Amino acid sequence: MDYKNVLTTCVYCGCGCGLYLEVLDGRVIGVWPAKTHEITDGKLCIKGWNIDGFIYHEDRLKTPLIRKDGHLVEASWDEALSLVAEKLGTIKAESGPDSIAFLSSAKGTNEENYLLQKLSRAVIGTNNVDHCARL
Amino acid sequence: MMDAGRHPNITLMTYSEVEEVSGYIGQFKVKVRQRPRYVDMDLCTGCGACVEACVFKKGVPNEFDEGLSRRKGVYIPMNGQGVPMKAVIDEDACLFLHRGKCVKKCMDACPTNAIDFDQKERLVDLEVGSIVVATGFDKFDAARLSAYSWGKSPNIIDGLQFERLSSATGPTKGEILTAEGNKPSRVAIIHCVGSRDENANRYCSRVCCMYALKHAHLVRDKTGAEVFEFYMDIRAFGKGYEEFYERVQEEGVYFVRGRGAEIVVLENGKLQIKAEDTTLGIPVAIDVDMAILATAMEPQTDADHVAALFGLSRSADGFFQEAHPKLRPFHTNTDGVFLAGTCQSPKDVPDTVAHANAAAAEALVILDRGEVLISPTTAMVVEERCVGCGDCVLVCPYSAISLLNSKAHLNSALCKGCGTCVATCPSGAIEALHFTDQQIVAEIEGVLAWQ
Amino acid sequence: MAVEEFEPRIVAFMCNWCTYAGADNAGVARLESPANILPIRVMCSGRISPELVLRTFREGADGVLVMGCHLGDCHYSSGNHRTIKRIPLLKSLLGFAGINPERLQLEWVSAAEGPRFTQVTKAFVERVRTLGPLSEEVAA
Amino acid sequence: MNEQPVPSIIEAIRQTVAERLQELDGVVGLRRSSEGVAPHVFQQGDDLSELEIVPRYPLTTVVSRLHKSFPEIRLGIVARGCDERAFVEMAKRNQIDPDRLFILGIACTAEEAEECHCAAPFPKHLVVGKPVAPGSPNPVVAEYDNTPLAKRNAFWRRQFAKCIKCYGCRNICPECFCEDCAMEDPAWVEPGLLAPPFPVFHLIRAMHMASRCVACRQCDLTCPAHIPLTVLYDLMRRDMEATLGYIPGEDIKAPPPLSVTLNEAPLLVNTGHMD
């Protein structure tokens, strides 16, 4: 019996509520609001309360999918990233950097979001970058 | 009764009480507590030698003679006419069992060595397919109505006592005598004692009118005494009953239409019956030597216990509730359990026989058919939604739900579809088939569409 | 436009064995019951969950009658024992939320009580009529 | 803010837990880490100086999950009065096996009792601390009977208009353990409405809580909209006691009164329906 509560941050929106994932023998079994969290004070909205819902969801993607002959086919990360890089490179070359936009997600961390805008601005060269929490 | 006792497929369990009933139609499990009779039923021939030999001469009041005679510690029930016709030893009366001291002459007298003081109480488990409840009635205790001076004179008796007096096997060998041993010259019969009375039972006990008329006839026939019947109405409802009423009228019985209001025990020992004769519109007072009270039939005092045991309901009068007053008069709301006779309502002999035959037939039909039809309006557990809280188990009036591996499990053979569990389940895990929430909500929407 | 008299809409849940038969009895005896009563038959008054009552109010009923067998007469022996306990608590709750608890009423009507059926339904309709529409009360 | 517990009480409960861990498979309590305080199952060898008693979490829910996952496990629980009451009601409904749970009771402070308006701020199996007097009744509840219906209606309308339908009140409740919740059933609560329909949404829950609410106040504490839910539940508890004499969490042998017959749990008020 290995029971623990792991403090984490809700990934559903930019508020970033603190919550505990309740873990029993390596499997997430529930959510507790973090009562000692300075900001969220033991409160959550419906999304935070159900944050564990997607973890083991049968519809969750575990590998990238690439559409081949009209069907989505499981692919490796290398294959997928190479394809994305190649296509982005082609589009940028044909239509210019502002023909590309980047949409970031609250499910990424601050650092990941920073890196995404860096990719957008420094690598591709566009300011077309936005975030789901602003939509 | 004799036939039942002799039938190879019928096991009579005397001196026995049902302790526990579980299961359901087709497979009831019944636990029976069998009290020791202290007589080996296989050996006893019912010769009565032990009764003769019993040294307890004083004896105890004989219940079969309604206390008008006494019996010994060992006896053959019903003054030697019981079924099965075998001796029994009354623990509370037997000098050996009760006081621990007796010469046990009964043992010496018994030609088959049937007496066995080592018999112990035992529990018997039975598996049966159907059950007929025929627990009968209780006699109304006339002491509850003080106006009738019950217990103040030995010549105030009730109908059953009179039956014993006029019986050839009774305490007077069938002679109708007062307590003083004389033939009465005037006898009063009072109807509706404890029946049709707001102070006792509101219902009509149905049988009293006719037995009271029979008693009048017997008194006239055997003693020639003057007989006064105090009655409100004569309910001669059965085949040949009205004709019998007319015959008794012709025999010279006086009919006084008015409830017997009071019995006064006079100083000379005679009884004065006071009443209002409503046909003449005057109060009357008639002195008699003997008063016979036509007492009501009442539910057995332990009817609530029996009802709980077999899952029966009781109607407002306390008798067991039939499933439908007209169409299912001997069925109960527990499938496979039937009612026979006066445990359901007061009945006379032909009605009881008809009721009991019907119940027996229906009980057999189930066994013969081997399968039962149940109503489709039962509840249904949706297991994935059940959290196993067990509220439904508590709520079910039929014990149709049990917890199995922390999930509600419903036996649809037991379920009657009341839906109380559906309303109780917090999880919405039980549906009432044909009365689902969705169906009722659709009805609510439908009826409220009216503006 | 003339002001029409308020006609309350009342949903009456009736148990199959007593009250529904009692309503039939009233009909057979040619006794008039108010048309405001909108009957819904269930097997036992014990079937009526708080959720059904609340949903009925939500659907716009001005009053709800829950009707079953007298105590001791329940076809299911003790289904109505649960009803008799549930209803007062539900009435309390309605009162807490500021809805007049009198809009919910429990009545026992046996299969033989046709006259009683018309009497209690008439009385309830008149009572709810004086309370006015539920929509006005909860919108206040 | 919660008062810091008196050091001697926390020391004493740590000591007790250490002793009971000799024979138990674990003790459910609160543990402080660098991340904050959260429910935890202390096992032999754990650092008991990390055991805390504030803030309050519904620890019986943790027990229930563990009892269901491990059918043999024997646990202890550091329990306040409300935790013990929650345990009693959960045990009645087969969510906790009473033979496999040992109450290590601690008393609340007078300040805590007052903050919760708690009528019984200590468990029956009290191990550490001294019982303090009950907190004063909630003034809103005390005044409620004198509040006209229209005012009550307006009050709750205003309160429930704030509801963001997070279901936090239900999720945190130790007595809400259904697989499927009536408040999510489209037959009772039409989906897609925010705020949820008044009063159906809230009254369904209140009715379900009638014989269960142990006044732990977790729902109040976790509501992001600050809806004073315990006012509703306190009123419900009051009327439950008056109508059926039932105080949730008081007696493990008393059956849930709405689920049994009148013979087993009689009605104490005359509603005119007893004939």
Image (cartoon, grey):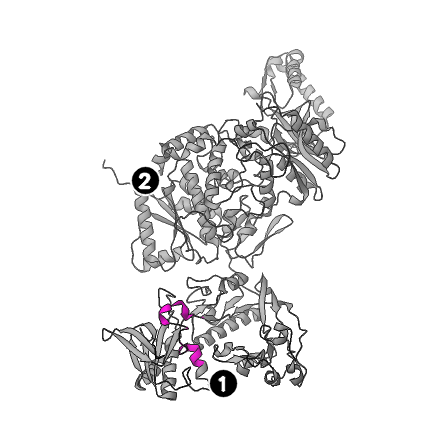
The C terminus of chain B: image quadrant: top left
Mark 1 lies on residue: B169
**Image location (x, y in percent) of residue C138:** 37, 34
- Disc 1 crowd, CA 10 A, few/some/many (<14, 14-19, 20+): some
At x 59% / y 42%, what residue is drawn? D88
Label 1 sits on what residue type?
Answer: Thr
Q: Residue at x 46, y 62 (%)?
A: B314
Which chain's residue wears label 1? B
> Would residue B3 be visible to someone looking at this image?
yes
Judged from the image, the secondary structure of the residue bearing numbered disc 2 is helix
Q: Which of the two residues, D48 or D149, is positioned nearer the viewer here?
A: D48
Q: Which of D12 and B271 is in front in this view?
A: B271
Q: Does the magenta stretch include residue A66?
A: no
Determine which residue is flagged by label 2: C131
The answer to which quarter of the image holds residue B5 is bottom right
Viewer can see residue B240 = no
The amino acid beneath tag 2 is: Leu
Q: Is residue D251 left or right of residue B273?
A: right
Residue at the (61%, 85%) spot, across then down = B49
The chain letter for the residue carrying disc 2 is C
Q: What stretch is highlighted in magenta?
A: B139-163
Question: What element does badge 1 sit on?
Answer: loop
Residue B145: name its quadrant. bottom left
